[in-house]
Image: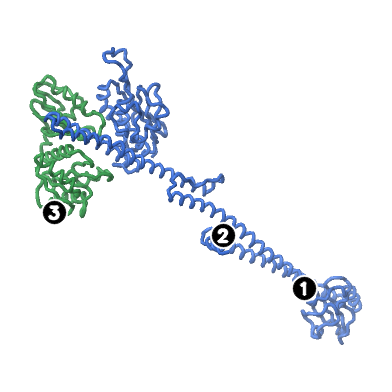
Amino acid sequence: MNSWWGRIASLWRTTTVRLTAIFIAIFIIFSVLLLGYTAFQVSYAIQRQQTDAIHRETGQLVQLDRQRGIRSVAIAVQQLSQRPGPGIYYLGDATGQQIVGNVSDFPPNILAAPGEYSFSYDRNVDLENPNAGDEGGYAVVQTTLLDNGFRLVVGRDVVERRGFTAIIFGWLGLGVLGIVVLSALAGGITANRVIKRIDSITATSSKIMSGNLSERVPMTRRNDEFDDLARSLNAMLDRIEQLLQGLKDVTDNVAHDLKTPLTRLRNRAQAALGDKATEETRRETLEGVIEESDQLIRTFNALLLIARVEAGTPSGAFSPVNLKEVVEDIVELYEPVAEEQGARLTWSANEGIVLEANRELLGQALVNLIENAIKYGVRRDHPEGEDDADRPKSTIDVRTSADASFITLEVCDNGPGIPEGERGRVLERFVRLEKSRTAAGSGLGLSLVSAVAHLHKGELVLDDNHPGLCARLVLPRKR
Amino acid sequence: MKILLIEDDTEAAKYLVQALDEAGHVTHHAADGETGMAMAESMDYDVMIIDRMLPRRDGLSIIESLRAQNDNTPVLILSALGEVDDRVAGLRSGGDDYLTKPYAFTELLARIEVLARRANPAEADTKYSVGGLTLDRLARTVDRDGENILLQPREFRLLEYLMRHAGQVVTRTMLLENVWDYHFDPQTNVIDVHMSRLRAKIDRGHDNPLLHTIRGAGYMIRE
């Protein structure tokens, strides 16, 4: 019982239930007013009808008296009296002696003066028909004074009318009760549904708070506003989970991947301190230490940059960037390196592709793609001394293209490519494919390109170049 | 050189003061913004190194006040790890160069030495000359010992930057920033390849090379 009340109390706190209650109350008030008004009108109309009938009959009888005399009136009243129904008729002389009629025992004042009266009477005694029951009667009558002191009383027993009104009001009450019950039921069902949906969201969020991040708000097939909310909440949860997973991966990777170079750094420094080291080797070792720490700083900077780009707050604002200029600059910067590594770096870019972008990051992304192509896309498996002309030349093509909605910047090589199954994985931080372990690198290059793509609401797509890899940066024109 | 270092990380400051001392510079250190501001106002320095985030007074506001007082001492802004790297805001406040932590000391040293020189009016020269090498900024010609050298536009800008800072170490990052206008670290030896091409054009066939590689730091052009 207590928990039941608790349930009611907690239900009452909810906005849904309160709103429902308010609506029910307003509905009831309006229903009562409307039904009451209707009942009053109906009862009034019946009353009017009866009064009109009394007046009409009285008028006809008075006219009959004038035209044909009291005798005809008496016959007419006699006939009327014998008709079944609520009619009350009386014709008496000046002394109060009844001549004809179905009622005799009027209160004296009714016969004394003309006018309209209403009074209670005992039906059992007075009505000619004794089967009418033993209830008390109530009558509305009109007394008229005819010539020679004759008194005519025409009226109606209104008990039936009142019964009718009572029935109307009875049904009205029942109707209101029905409305109350039905609307309470409807309100309850609505409130319950809403509360259930909200409860499921609350339950999910408390599960998530207790540590189960993979929990999601259940969806229904109704596709209503709660499903919209659930969808957007789930998308938010996906993003949070992804970010947290990213953070966890970074922490793990930093711990793992930076330990190796730090250990190497320490060992080198220790070697430089060793007794056997000559001045020259000591110097060489220390220079190596500096190079190693520079590489570490670069890795840290790359990690920080990725984190900032992914958080959406990188350095520098977005501004209109001419893609051709970026491609031209970066290709010119890398062309000598590519050539030194045995690859031909070419570019083609459409004029006038201007997009809202972060020039620095776009440039950095292109640099990373070109560096990857040089590092992993250039064939080095040819023996030295082989004739250069026979050897298929490694090429790296940088191309831009644009249509109405997307701008594409792609870097394609004709190297070994990346197996399809690995393409998703190489975008993760510190992931380096087994084959590429020997080349220098931090495993952060493509992660950054992917983050830059996301910052521009675009995507990094890795595709097969038959042979080789096509890294495609697809950016929407409208950010 | 006399350097003012405003940096609240005392451990980093201690190391920096010592390293700058070894490089032959006198460094005064202030650990908070107010003290730093007072020191900057009371003494003349060749270069100031100012951290962005400082207790008691923000680094950028110090630079703005100094510039408002017509103090044009070159300033290198340091921005800490994890901060939003807003180079533009830093330079707009009146800073002359911007370096994000963590940085290599050689990078910092090269930058402040270049900054200190920038305060001198040598920049207005239309001709740079190192040894027998002459670069004419207006005619856009380069010759060595009277012999004309043909350079690509980018190579010209590269040499121009090096010669403007002749006798000073110029890091790869500085070259990338000033010649290519990009502020990132190239992973491979991109700058080195450009430098070796440039070196081939200006030093080949000459007994005394002018373009020198400074290991662990960068490049320098000198006699």
Q: Does the rendering let one see residue A67?
A: no
| Between marks 2 and 1 in the image, the one whose residue lies nearer the viewer | 2
Q: CA distance from mark 2 to mark 3?
A: 69 Å
On the image, the x and y values in percent for residue A23 come to 57, 61
Answer with the quarter of the image where residue A41 lies.
bottom right
In what element is the residue under mark 2? Answer: helix
Residue A30 visible in image: yes
- What label sits on residue A51 in the rendered view? 1
* Rendered position, B100 above or below A426: below
- Counting residues from the N terminus, which is met first, the one under dot 2 or under dot 1? 2
Q: Amino acid at mark 2?
A: Thr
At 82% from the left and 82% from the top, the residue drawn is A106
Quadrant assignment, res A431: top left
Q: For mark 3, name the chain.
A: B
Q: What's under tag 1, amino acid-wise?
A: Thr
Label 1 – label 3 distance at C-alpha: 109 Å
Q: Which mark is residue B38?
A: 3
